[in-house]
Image (cartoon, rainbow, N blue to C red):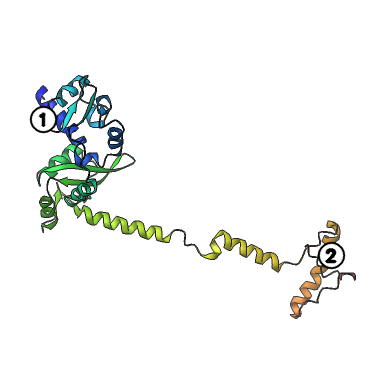
Amino acid sequence: MTEEDQKAKILQQVEFYFSDSNLLNDKFLFTTQQANEGWVPISVISQFERMKKYRPIETIVEALRESKELLEVSENGELVKRKAPLPSNQNEILVAINKRSVVVNHLPEDATLDDLIKFFNTIGATNQVRMKKKFKKFTGSVIVEFKTEEIANKLLEQEEKLKYGETEVIVIAKVAYDESKAQEFGKRRGGKGKKSFGSSKRGRDHKRNDRNRERSPQRSDEPKEVRERDDEAKKPEQEESEKKSEPAAAPAPAAEPAPAAEPTPAPATE
């Protein structure tokens, strides 16, 4: 690659970074230039993955100075920014970008970005190709923004299935893709927080209280040995009662000695 070819590739890449298509979707670059009146250090840009191969940094500076319409380099050669700021109607720009974009699924996971850019440019001129990644690995899906909405629509409307090499891929309009994802998200959100009463904390507490109310009052004022002795004495009578299916006898008044088989209710506290 000649020096001129290298500078052309550098300029093409950085102009893409500052384009409407990328800048509005690149959170880091967008916030960086917003915080510095549009300026971004060239040393920062030189650390982007696709810029690391271009060294020394002075080569990048020289290439960016050749931008005719989009970019401006500071006098000291340390900063770069757009000559014209981003348009104020940014929402309209994003809508237009979505209309000329498609999502392509089932691509080979070993495909490279350069190969994908080359492939989609055979279909029509592109503004960008974004690889979707998970844990830094390509998932086989890309978002392709074409130069015009017409190119995108032509691809969506063609009857013949699109193939990448021998692999048949699925093409979806970006607008339709976003709508389907929004619906899926809404369904997931709709199921959250709607737990049954019994599975909620309030429901569990309610059940716990019910169980506590069903239990016989504990005679906390009696020694543990006495309670254990009474419980042992009560077991035979309980078993006999269950066999006969007879109702249990009513508890004796607090003033009289309690039968061994029946606990004496503790007085209610106020």
Q: Nearer the viewer, residue 245 or 18?
A: 18
Q: Please state if 78 lies on the left or on the right of 223 as rendered.
A: left
The secondary element bearing badge 1 is classed as loop
Above-or-below relation of 97 to 219: above
Q: Give the percent coordinates (x, y) of residue 189.
A: 40, 58
**Residue lying at 81% horizontally and 62% vertically, measured from the top left:** 219
Circle 1 sits on which residue?
68
Query: Quick check: marks 2 and 1 in contact, CB under 8 Å?
Result: no
Q: Give the percent coordinates (x, y) of residue 188.
A: 39, 58
Circle 2 sits on which residue?
230
Q: Give the percent coordinates (x, y) of residue 19.
A: 19, 38
Mark 1 crowdedness (10 Å alpha carbons): few <14, some 14-19, many ≥20: few
**Quadrant where the image shows the N terminus:** top left
Tell me where residue 212 sits by quadrant. Answer: bottom right
Residue most extreme to the right: 256
The secondary element bearing badge 2 is classed as helix
Q: Give the percent coordinates (x, y) of residue 32.
A: 30, 33
**Residue lying at 27% horizontally and 39% vertically, measured from the top left:** 26
**Quadrant where the image shows the C terminus:** bottom right
The answer to whether residue 2 shows anywhere in this view is no
Q: CA distance from mark 2 to mark 1?
A: 99 Å
Above-or-below relation of 4 to 160: above
Which of pointers 2 and 1 indicates the residue nearer the eye?
1
* Badge 2 or badge 1: first in the primary sequence: 1
Residue type beneath disc 2: Asp
